[in-house]
């Protein structure tokens, strides 16, 4: 995972604070519960993106011609395939 659990919790805490401070949501419950729910959403989103990344890398590795990872061609194909898969899965990144 690209972010540690501590980092995810920190981000969730900041998001909850901004939402509440700017009255963007009405929430009368515990901020701990709100932060936990936001953390859950962030974590689920990261898992979806990681799954898409794995699928794209596997697609590139299974191509007939070996393409060196990190090359300009690999990066271009990676971006194109990631966008295609994300769109197919209704995922916005």
Image (spheres, rainbow, N blue to C red):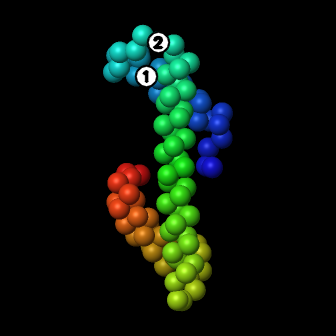
Image position of 7 (left or right of 86): right
Q: Earlier in the sequence, mark 2 or mark 1?
A: 1
In the orientation shown, which residue stands out farthest toward the bottom? 65
Image position of 25 (left or right of 61): left
User: Is residue 39 something that shows in the picture?
Assistant: yes
**Label tally:** 2
Q: Which one is closest to the eye, mark 2 or mark 1?
A: 2
Secondary structure at badge 1 equals helix
Q: Position of residue 13 (x, y in %)?
A: 54, 25
Secondary structure at badge 2 equals loop
In front: 20, or 47? 47
User: Is residue 72 something that shows in the picture?
Assistant: no
- Residue 37 vs 80, above or below: the answer is above
Q: Residues within 10 Å of mark 1 (few under 14, many from 20)?
A: few
Among the 4 quarters of the image, the one containing residue 66? bottom right
- Residue 61 vs 27, above or below: the answer is below
Q: Residue at x 40, y 22 (%)?
A: 19
- Residue 89 vs 69, above or below: the answer is above
Q: Where is residue 61 in the image (x, y as percent from the top left)?
A: 57, 78
Image position of 81 (left or right of 14): left
Tell me the residue that label 1 is attached to: 18
Q: Which mark is residue 29?
A: 2
Q: Residue at x 53, y 47 (%)?
A: 46
Q: Where is residue 86 in the image (x, y as percent from the top left)?
A: 40, 59
Among the 4 quarters of the image, the one containing residue 43? top right
Q: Which residue is drawn at 49% across and 30% down?
A: 38
The Cα–Cα distance between marks 2 and 1, rounded to whole angstroms, is 16 Å
Marks 2,1: beta carbons within 8 A? no
């Amino acid at each position: 995972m690209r972010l540690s659990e501590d980092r995810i919790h920190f981000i969730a805490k900041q998001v909850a604070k901004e939402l509440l401070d700017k009255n963007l949501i009405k929430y009368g419950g515990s901020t701990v519960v709100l932060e936990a729910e936001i953390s859950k959403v962030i974590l689920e989103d990261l898992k979806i993106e990681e799954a898409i990344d794995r699928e794209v890398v596997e697609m590139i590795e299974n191509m007939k011609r070996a393409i060196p990872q990190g090359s300009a061609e690999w990066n271009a194909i990676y971006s194109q395939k990631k966008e295609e898969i994300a769109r197919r899965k209704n995922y916005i990144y």
